[in-house]
Amino acid sequence: MNEYDLINCYLNLIFDNSFTYFTRILDGYRGLCQFRKWMRKRNINLNAIENIGYDAFNAICKAKNKDQIIDKIDPKYLDELMEYINTERNKYQIVVLSSFDYSDTINVYLTSSQIVKDLSSDKVSVINCHSLLKKDDLSFYGPYRHFINALYQIDRWPGLLIFKGDNWSFLPVYTIKDIQDAMFKIKQDTIFSSRYLSPYDSYFIQLSDLHLGNKKKNKGCLALEKSLDETCKQLRSYYSLKFLITGDLMNSPNRKNMYEASNFMKLLKNKYSGDVSFILGNHDVIVNGFNIFKRQKSKVIAFLLNESIKVFEKEKIILIKIDSTVEGNLARGKVGKKQLDNIDEELASIKNLKDYTMVAMLHHHLFPITRDEFLKQRWREKMFVGKIMDSSKALVDSQDLIEWFRKHQIQYVLHGHKHLPFFTNHDGMYVIAAGSSCGSGAKESDSRYLSYNVLKYDHRYKRFKYCFIIYDDMTLQDRQRIIVNMF
């Protein structure tokens, strides 16, 4: 666990009374010992936590509800814990958030114990990390609800997350004066009177491999909608939300599934005021393992695709929608030279092409994909035969397509197909894979996840800032994991 996991463990315990979250984030008695050590360093003295033994902790982990958990805590310390919780909830809480930059002198102060002493009072409690963030360790398990709001501003860190009850604010910190200004607003009780909203940021959500029409996936679609409800509330922007679906919207192409896909599109457009873009996946054109007739495929294409090029004029983005099901059979894809030549002609007709950021989306993967570390590998991926199976699903003409991307200076490529989220940089070209947004392929021993990606785009610099991979538990145990990838 990193320090931010411990902070989120504390925040969930104290401000959401979430004992179940508390045990899951810690993930074992060793984690509890680490958490207690973290509290002691910050002079947080909670006997109720300090006196949980090994057997009691294991019993707490097996408890099915809050009452069963409380029964395992020594009664003589329970009142002390509840008094501490009530006291803290009546204070302003400040979580100090440092950045990655070791050369930024403000980070030295933000990670010191001195800032806690300077800002703490009867009215204010302060917690911070004693070390800087590492770009390769941005995995957050069970983040506290207000922490998630600050996390969506990670491109503006260092800063202060300030909250009290349901109110919250995130303030970037560049100088000591920014901290002083924040403390003055807290003193005046005006810290929540307004929130800064950047005029330059917009958000894209990448969904993939929903397989609508499959009964299990239809249940997953309900879980996805619940997850998107929360996520979309946190994505504050002057620009409409963009949904990019990288194939396999349907489990197979028939009238019923097309109807479900159409309803899903309407949901994204109407409920989230979203703009929706699609490309085809192999399941969108395959019935019972066979390619559908060209006539039927043309109906699917007409249903899902009405353009190869889509221009987002406000964002100055050109979206190139590539059909990787043109010549492949079964799960194998191919783009073909003819399609790329046609796209070349369309691009040639766009004036001032260099003023745009170009983003490509297709279904099949270009490069090998690995799982996030917290996911256990399926047995077949450890077998030689598994490697053969995976290679058979790779894009046939991937090398030709990669060369085409480089020729057109395309920096961002989005795809699906493997049901596994993945983020990588190949010589300056970012390749972003989405997992199954209705759940499949991302599995732990006791949990099954759906996943999707959230990307933040900066209009000023014409580049993406980050990609969040969001995992949500389909068993509805409220276990969310967010993995942050910075561009």
Image (spheres, helix red, strand yellow):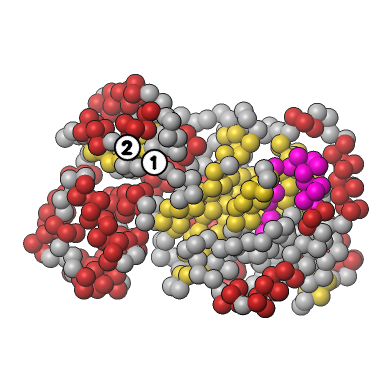
Residue 415 magenta? yes
Q: How many dots with numbers? A: 2
Q: Relative to 273, does residue 260 appear above or below in the rendering?
A: below
Q: Which residue is mark 2?
A: 111
Q: Give the camera-side residue of 164 and 201.
A: 201
Circle 2 — which element? loop
Pinpoint residue 321: horizontal percent, then vertical percent: 77, 50
Pinpoint residue 461: horizontal percent, then vertical percent: 63, 30
Q: Which residue is mark 1?
A: 132
The amino acid type of the residue labelled 2 equals Thr
Q: Residue at x 39, y 56 (%)?
A: 142
Marks 2 and 1, the one that precedes in the sequence: 2
Circle 1 — which element? loop
Asked whether, in this view, residue 68 is left or right of residue 4, the answer is left
Q: Relative to 401, does residue 203 appear above or below in the rendering?
A: above
The amino acid type of the residue labelled 1 equals Leu
The image's mark for residue 246 is none
Q: Residue at x 54, y 43 (%)?
A: 486
Write down the region rendered in magenta: 401-416
Asked whether, in this view, residue 43 is left or right of residue 361, the answer is left
Using a 10 Å C-alpha cutoff, classify the residue at mark 2 as few (fewer than 14 neighbours), some (14 to 19) or many (20 or more): many
Can residue 431 be seen here? Answer: yes
Q: Which residue is situated farthest in the left direction here?
A: 76
Q: Relative to 423, does residue 201 appear above or below in the rendering?
A: above
Pinpoint residue 80: horizontal percent, then vertical percent: 12, 54
Pinpoint residue 331: horizontal percent, then vertical percent: 75, 69
Using a 10 Å C-alpha cutoff, classify the residue at mark 1 as few (fewer than 14 neighbours), some (14 to 19) or many (20 or more): some
Q: Are marks 2 and 1 in contact (CB under 8 Å)?
A: yes
Can residue 269 be seen here? Answer: no
Quadrant placement of the C terminus = top right
